[in-house]
Amino acid sequence: DAMVIQNPRYQVTQFGKPVTLSCSQTLNHNVMYWYQQKSSQAPKLLFHYYDKDFNNEADTPDNFQSRRPNTSFCFLDIRSPGLGDAAMYLCATSRGGLAGGKETQYFGPGTRLLVL
Amino acid sequence: AQRVTQPEKLLSVFKGAPVELKCNYSYSGSPELFWYVQYSRQRLQLLLRHIPRESIKGFTADLNKGETSFHLKKPFAQEEDSAMYYCAPLRGSNYKLTFGKGTLLTVNP
């Protein structure tokens, strides 16, 4: 019963070639997040959507963009991947609402990006 | 600056021994704190949150405001507890978690 689905699980791209990672959810949650996790490091929040409202982290490079065409789907676009962008990318969702973010975040399995 | 510290990158204990995974934070006010866990080949998931007396899988975590700590404890570790554990304070009330660097717990038979 996958609730947060990420495709593909592994993605290989070339240096400078745009790539899109996908996330979908069956939870009907308001909030969707994208995290970057490099080897042996903590997940780092890149941005999140509360419904259609996009919230970018101050230190997220411009090279990273996101789209959320509807409640269920959210995409991470990397316009010109560099070698330093090789990482695991995690999508997560939460219900949102009055709890102010105190509710559980549900994570997908991640997409591992390799940049050649 | 707001920060979360997990001082131990690796922690190894024997089955049946007590285990404590440390987490210290430097956030102003009264932060909300969570522990997330990632078992081998599984996705990251919530273990427990800062709710007084909450116990999940035998784990508890007490918020100590004086010491600014939120250590995770279990009196008798099991082999299936082997995993990566992340302490994660909530930043304000705007849905953002900040993850510590994590502690890899290994419970040996």
Image (cartoon, coloured by chain):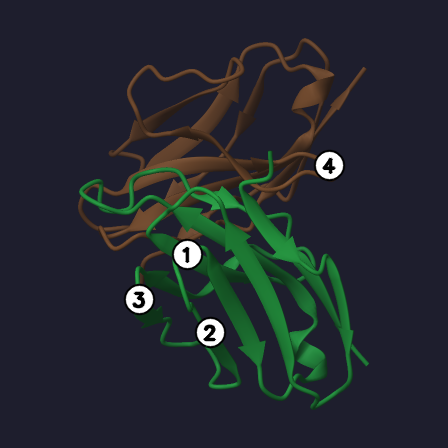
Chain colours: A green, B brown
Q: Which residue is mark 1?
A: A32
The quadrant of the picture occupied by the C terminus of chain A is bottom right
Distance between the alpha carbons at the discs numbered 1 and 2:
11 Å
* Subunit bearing disc 3: A
Please give the name of the residue rendered at 53% of the width and 85% of the height, measured from the top-left corner.
Answer: A63
Q: Under tag 3, what secondary structure?
A: loop
Please give the name of the residue rendered at 68% of the width and 84% of the height, measured from the top-left corner.
Answer: A82
1 or 2: tag closer to the N-terminus: 1
Circle number at residue A66: 2
Q: Which residue is mark 4?
A: B40
- Asked if badge 3 and badge 4 are on a common chain, one would say no
Q: Nearer the viewer, mark 4 or mark 1?
A: 1
Q: Which residue is mark 3?
A: A52
Given contact means CB atoms under 8 Å apart, are the residues at marks 1 and 2 in contact?
A: no
Q: Nearer the viewer, mark 3 or mark 1?
A: 3
Q: Position of residue A8 (x, y in %)?
A: 71, 60
